[in-house]
């Protein structure tokens, strides 16, 4: 079935295939919002004791939801998934790595070459992974 015929069967198919929210379950949304505002260098569009929301430049909405209020109850632990940030240059990568280190962000993986490119992993206050990387193709082009 082609994408066009899928849309004809289900007119919502094009919307469903483009998720635009990512939610992280956190202990304290206000603490997490301060962390993300600092490292992303943007302010949340909403910040409450139970939920905070960022409108990222990519169009993705990043929500920070208090674990205690999530239904059904959260059973997974932090660190079982990642938010990934692809960069275009090694210089940008090095700048962000140095900047986050200077801000005291916990680094779980120092810069490492992997099969997909150059990467490092940082942790937010709840242990969620933030993978920053430059794809192999971008490294080869520079």
Image: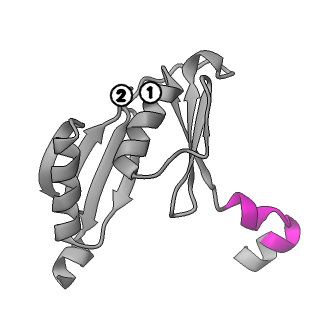
Above or below 55: residue 64: above
- Residue 129 located left or right of residue 43: left
User: Is 124 inside the magenta-drawn segment?
Assistant: no
- How far across and how far down the image is residue 128, in percent? 38, 34
| Magenta span | 7-17
Horizontal relation, residue 31 to residue 69: left or right: left
Q: Residue at x 87, y 68 (%)?
A: 9
Colour scheme employed for the rendering of this structure: one colour
**Placement of the C terminus among the 4 image quadrants:** bottom left
Determine which residue is flagged by label 2.
Answer: 125
Figure quadrant of residue 141: bottom left
Residue under the image location 24 percent in, 37 percent down: 105
Is 27 above or below relative to 89? above
Residue 87 spot, x, y in % from top left: 31, 66
How far apart, in angstroms, are the residues tagged by discs 2 and 1?
8 Å
- Can residue 2 be seen in this snapshot? no
Residue tagged by mark 1? 31
| Residue situated furthest bottom in the rendering | 141
Q: Is residue 10 magenta?
A: yes
Prevailing SS of the magenta stretch: helix
Residue plotted at (34% across, 29% down) = 127
Q: Are marks 2 and 1 in contact (CB under 8 Å)?
A: yes
Q: How many numbered tags mark residues here?
A: 2
Query: Is 142 left, or right, of 13 in this rendering?
Result: left
């Amino acid at each position: 079935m082609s994408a066009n015929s899928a849309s004809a069967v289900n007119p919502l198919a094009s919307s469903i295939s483009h998720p635009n929210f990512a939610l992280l379950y956190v202990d304290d949304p206000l603490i997490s919002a301060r962390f993300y505002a600092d490292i992303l260098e943007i302010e949340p569009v909403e910040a409450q004791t139970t939920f905070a929301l960022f409108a990222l430049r990519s169009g993705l909405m990043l929500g920070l939801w208090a674990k205690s209020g999530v239904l059904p109850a959260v059973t997974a632990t932090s660190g079982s998934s990642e938010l990934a940030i692809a960069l275009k240059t090694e210089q940008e990568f090095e700048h962000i790595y140095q900047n986050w280190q200077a801000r005291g962000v916990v680094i779980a993986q120092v810069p490492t070459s992997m099969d997909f490119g150059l990467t490092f992993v940082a942790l937010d206050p709840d242990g969620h992974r933030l993978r920053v990387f430059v794809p192999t193709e971008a490294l080869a082009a520079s």
